[in-house]
Image: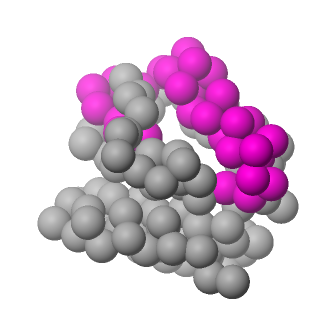
Amino acid sequence: MLQLMSNLPAHVLGVRASQEVEDNDLKSVLLPGLDRLAAQYGEIYYILVLDTPVEQFTAGAWWQDLVAGIKHFTQWKKMAIVTDQKAVEKFTNVFSYVSPGEARGFEHSELNEAIAWVSSKDE
C-alpha cells in the first residue's frame, strides 16, 4: 500500500510504502503525484519511506516504478529513500551516479534530515 505523506513543501512528493505494494498503488498514488510535479514545476523532488521490505513490492509494482522513472527521467532533481534496509540504502546512493538528479538513502532515524535534504532546492 502507498500513502501520500503530508506536511511537505508543495514541490515535494512524499510517499510511504507499507504492507504489500502493487501496481495499482503506483498507478493511483505515485504516478499522478509525479505527473503533477512535472507539470507544475518541471522537476521532481521525491521522498519514499519504506516501512515494508522491498520484497513486498509485486512484479507489477516494480514495472510501474520503472515506467515512472523513465517517463520523467530528465526531471528528477532529488530522491530520498528512507529505509533501514542497508542494501536499498546503498543502492540508492550508487543510483545517484547514473541518474540525472541526486539520490540519497537515509535510515528511519534520519527521516527529518531526509525531508530537509529533499526539500532544499539548490539554485
Tell whether 69 sits left or right of 59. right
Q: Which residue is the extreme one toward the left?
A: 109
> The magenta stretch spans which residues?
15-44
Task: Please state the horizontal and vertical placement of residue 35, each as a whole percent of the image.
Answer: 73, 36
Residue at image location 59% in from the left, 59% down from the top: 45
Vertical relation: 39 (above or below) 41: above
Residue at image location 45% in from the left, 46% down from the top: 14
**Nearer to me, 115 or 71:** 115
Q: Considering the image in quadrants, where does the N terminus appear?
A: top left
Quadrant in the picture for residue 28 = top right
Task: Please state the horizontal and vertical placement of residue 72, each as a whole percent of the image.
Answer: 79, 49
What predominant SS class does the magenta segment belong to? helix
Query: How many numbered dots are placed on residues in this image?
Result: 0
Residue 17 magenta: yes
Vertical relation: 55 (above or below) 89: above
Residue at image location 70% in from the left, 36% down from the top: 36
Residue at image location 48% in from the left, 66% down from the top: 119
Tell whether 39 sits left or right of 28. right
Task: Please state the horizontal and vertical placement of residue 100, each as a whole percent of the image.
Answer: 76, 72
Q: How is the image coloured?
A: one colour
Q: Is residue 42 visible?
A: yes
Q: Considering the image in quadrants, where does the C terminus appear?
A: bottom right
Tell whether 76 sits left or right of 79. right
Tell whether 42 sits left or right of 9. right
Residue 51 magenta: no
Task: Please state the horizontal and vertical placement of residue 39, each as a whole percent of the image.
Answer: 80, 42
Q: Is residue 55 visible?
A: no
